[in-house]
Amino acid sequence: MIDNDVTAGAILRIDLEALAANYRCVADCVAPVQVAGVVKADAYGLGAIPVTSALLEAGCRSFFVAHLGEARALRAHFDRDLSVAILNGLHPGGEEECAQIGAIPVINALDQLDRWTRFARACGKRLPCMLQFDTGMSRLGLSPSEVDDLVANPMRLDGVNVRLLISHLACADEPDQPFNRYQADRFEALCDRFPDIPRSLDNSAGTLLPRSHYDVVRAGIALYGGGAQSGSKGIRPVVTLDARIIQLRTVQAGEAVGYGLTHRFGQPSRLATLSIGYADGWPRCLGGRGSAFIGGVRVPIVGRISMDSLTIDVTGVASDQLRPGGLVELIGPLQSLETVASDAGTISYEILTQLGRRYARTYTSATASPQDPTFLTKVAQA
Ligand SMILES: *Cc1c(COP(=O)(O)O)cnc(C)c1O
């Protein structure tokens, strides 16, 4: 059992069964629209390979990453029939490898398009791509005037097959924001100039907006149990994080804890030092602000968070719950990912993508049984 793993300071559990259920939940919600899995940034920190395997099992065939290197890692591992698109497109010089591994670049600018078509013509193949339009976020994609230019010069598309037209919402997590409608209108007007090509506008939060979801949605955070959908209609948490108690101590009134002695005790108190710190991606700003749960009791993080440890005030916890090596919940049934993010003044995306490399990680899935003694090794090798 992973609980017996004493080589790491904290245990990160990733529930691939919940991930697959979340995929099916989003798919049911938008059907017959297709759901592509966004697995950039190592699947939001949860492991691109095990996450992609689980999504393939759940029926997902289309994936998005951000970089060519991420596409290469997926392609090296999966020989099955799946499409891998690169959201950031290609940097100059990336064309050859992209074509070689059969990845699909998202074309965000006319110079990217020109390099891809030139490469396609040079090797005498028709190469796939996606076209991104900027509908108001001003981050990536062709502007309306660049689209005019493209429509006026259609030979600029010679050599490529445009598989999907995409754009990205700036305010999808604010459903009442009128800009969502504005972007959808702009998207439709731009797409209409390229008839009969499938369309994709929505990320996870976009799937909740009361309008068409076009042909494909690109779901990331909802699959990982975070964001606007968390706790709603069937989206299940995927991640739990428990840290071990290193030691327990008693402090007297007037004593202080941690770097800078920022927290001073007004009364005798009991402290537990946990084996997790900011080097594990636990946000340093949670010092004096965040919480943990032990024996069902909420306890405050006191003092500054160190690189490898942090301190909680456990004065209110029954002493039979307190022992060196015991586990304390940081993300789980009592403290959601969203709560951690809001305590830290950030979003669940950032908490997930910062999750550290030092945890004892375990993946639970419906298909491989934890009773199978080779299960953990299989997952570790995945
Ligand atoms: C990251 C990303 C997504 C996924 O967004 P979620 O909010 O995690 O669902 C979709 N589309 C684009 C262009 C992205 O960059």
Image (cartoon, rainbow, N blue to C red):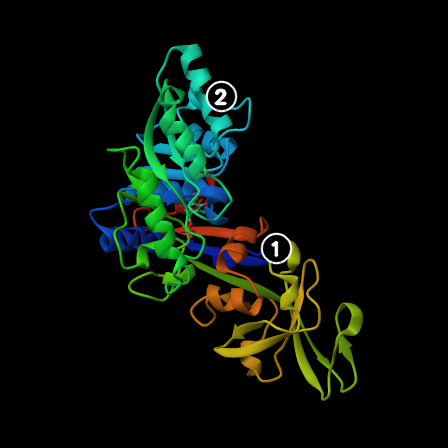
Q: Secondary structure at mark 2?
A: helix
Please report the residue visible at 20 percent of the width from the left and 47 percent of the height from the top: 32
Mark 1: C-beta under 8 Å from nearest atom of ligand 1: no
Tag shown at residue 159: none
Q: Going by the image, does 51 lie left or right of 95? A: left
Query: Could you tell me which quadrant the C terminus lies in?
Result: top left
The percent position of residue 241, horizontal first and vertical second, equals 50, 61
Q: Is residue 104 above or below residue 60?
A: above
Separation of residues labelled 1 and 2 (CA atoms): 40 Å
Residue at numbered disc 1: 280
Query: Could you tell me which quadrant the N terminus lies in?
Result: bottom left
**The furthest residue to the bottom:** 267
Residue at numbered disc 2: 115
Q: Is residue 94 above or below residue 382?
A: above
Please report the residue visible at 65 percent of the width from the left and 60 percent of the height from the top: 277
Nearest the eye: 83 or 318: 83
Q: Earlier in the sequence, mark 1 or mark 2?
A: 2
Q: Going by the image, does 252 lie left or right of 318? A: right
When asked about the image quadrant of residue 235, the answer is bottom left
The percent position of residue 170, horizontal first and vertical second, equals 45, 53
Residue 378 visible (yes or no): no
Q: Amino acid at mark 1?
A: Asp
Q: Is residue 155 above or below residue 57?
A: above
Nearest the eye: 285 or 169: 169
Q: Are marks 1 and 2 in contact (CB under 8 Å)?
A: no
